[in-house]
Image: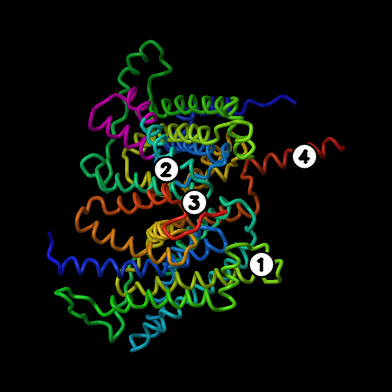
Amino acid sequence: MPDPSFVFAQSISGLTAAMFLFLIASGLSLIFGVLRVLNFAHGTFYMLGAYSAYQIVRWLGTGPVSFWIAALGAALAVALLGGIVERFLFQRLYGKEELYQLLFTYALVLILGDVAKIIWGTQQKSISRPPGLTSAVHVLGATIPYYNLFIILLGPAIALGFWFALQRTRAGRFIRAAALDRETLGALGVNVSALYTGVFVLASFLGGLGGALITPMRAIVPGMDTEVIVEAFVVVVIGGLGSFWGTFLGALIYGQVLSFGILFFPRFSIFSIFALMAMVLIIRPWGLLGRPLK
Amino acid sequence: MRRVPWALIVFLAALFVPAAGSRYYTFLANDVIIWALFATSLNLLVGYTGLVSFGHAAYFGIGAYTTGILMKKVGVSFLLAFPTAGIVAALFALVFGFFCVRLTRIYFAMLTLAFAQIVWAICFKWNEVTGGEQGMPEIPYPDFAWVDRVAAFLPFLGGYRTAEHFYFVTLLLVAACLVLLRRIVGSPFGRMLATIRENPERAEFIGVNVRRYELAAFVLAGGFAGLAGGLFGIFNRGVFPDFAYWTKSSEVLIMTLLGGMGAFFGPALGAAVLIWLNQQIVSYTEYWPLVLGTILVVLLFVFPGGIAGAAMALRHRLRRRAARA
């Protein structure tokens, strides 16, 4: 039996990973819930968020707030890109076959991935932790960087804020209604097309933010997009496609399975993740907290 | 108007590639032929049955590893290793497909993806058997010593290199597979797959066991993909885990779509065009994905029927114009 402080440290690292995955997967789940499209390009938006943050930090230098400005700016830039893509291209594919929509998002993966390579090259990039969060705290014999703590707190905060917006605001009601029945919502006079653009922008923002915030912990490299998108798929599938709290739960499970999988059977950690995904799909295709599609 | 036997013409022309073209063109044609089988096998699912698989690379990878392991580690001859690749891939497709066909649309696609990633993860980590991340280089060619003995009596067989011998083997085997696939889609079984694609509920009403037909299509598609993978591992001189990675699955989907899912030889055409374009473009730029993505966008927005679909529409229009004149 490994010593308890190590187990604790491992679960904290799993939790940190889970919160990042939640940030990314929540956007993916939102798009699926409302637009009924699996967006392969969501991982690319995450990567572009990371690169944009790196770029803005380069421009601003290392001031006390430059990291935070960079993270927000990167997320906004990616949100803008998402809006443009939805408005001018994606909107023309609604109502066509799912395969076409899937392949269009895959085309974005190919194109934007190469554009990132053209702009930033293939050398890996990194950003240092923001000032004020560089040190670490010792809990139960484990060393936890402040930045990880910040991420662990940020995840639930965003989840709660999101949930509140979905439940209480007018836009949130429209989004929930669109997920259930878009025709009726349109017939009631709601501008569904604008709503879709809004959802896409919001989801891209979350993806970009996830990418920007992960930069102090992981190197920015080409290929981080195709890797993360599969992880995000696993998370939304386990939790339930389109289910908000399901995504949160899926991310928590993923983070723990991965970090303890590496600990106890390192050879099977990736395998166990996909096996879990397959098992959920076989037993409960709509996920742990999702609802069956009509 | 009589139909031109295009498939036969292409096959006969392909027989002369090693004699007429350079080593490079033989290599290119060999690549195209193998991918043509892979893409056509996928079309049995996507185009004919209407099941969008996002994990077809799994069976390609399984086939490749089967022949790779059998020929390199066990020393089994190609004659046995090749059919085994198809059988093993088909068995995996039977197990995975059993669960997949219970799901519909997006969930089906997700589960095929999950199974493919499982296969990839196993190939990636099981160092003792698959070589892990490093893959399995130096898969031997089939034994062609007998060709030289035969060439003593049939002089036109002599004078080729091993890679060219393998090209002929690939060509003949893939041609046989394509003939078989063609018969399958033209059979009553194939017609029933099309019925299921158009209207699964109605097929159910008239007493068809839809799931069983879908599973049969899944197994056949997996088996032929396995055969393609078996050939590719030898052709590539090595088998690597990314054969089963999800991006490979989307590559073959793009080929299928580019050529046209509505025509039997569409996916093969798509494979040829894409591989040829790739070879042309990589000598100018390293940004092949950018070009591929752009092609895909144009395809989706302008020619959703692929090359075959566009050609058929054009022919239809010309014929109408001719009839009017």
> Residue B22, can we see it?
no
Q: Chain of mark 4?
A: B
Instruction: Give the extent of the magenta segment.
Output: B61-87
Query: What residue does disc 3 label?
Result: B281
Among numbered discs 3 and 4, the one appearing first in the sequence: 3
Tell which of B66 and B286 is nearer to you. Answer: B66
Labels 2 and 4 positioned on one and the same chain:
yes
Q: Which residue is mark 1?
A: A185
Chain where mark 3 sits: B
Report how far apart the C-alphas of labels 3 and 4 lie in the structure.
32 Å
Q: CA distance from mark 4 to mark 1?
A: 45 Å
- CA neighbours of label 4 inside 10 A, class few (<14), some (14 to 19), many (20+): few
Judge if badges 1 and 3 mark residues of a common chain: no
Residue at point 77% right, 39% down?
B318
4 and 1 marks on the same chain: no
Identify the residue position indicated by label 2 in the image: B57
* Residue A219 appears in the rendering: yes
Badge 3 and badge 2 in a common chain: yes
Residue most extreme to the top: B153
Give the residue displayed 39% in from the left and 85% down from the top. A60
Q: Which residue is mark 4?
A: B318
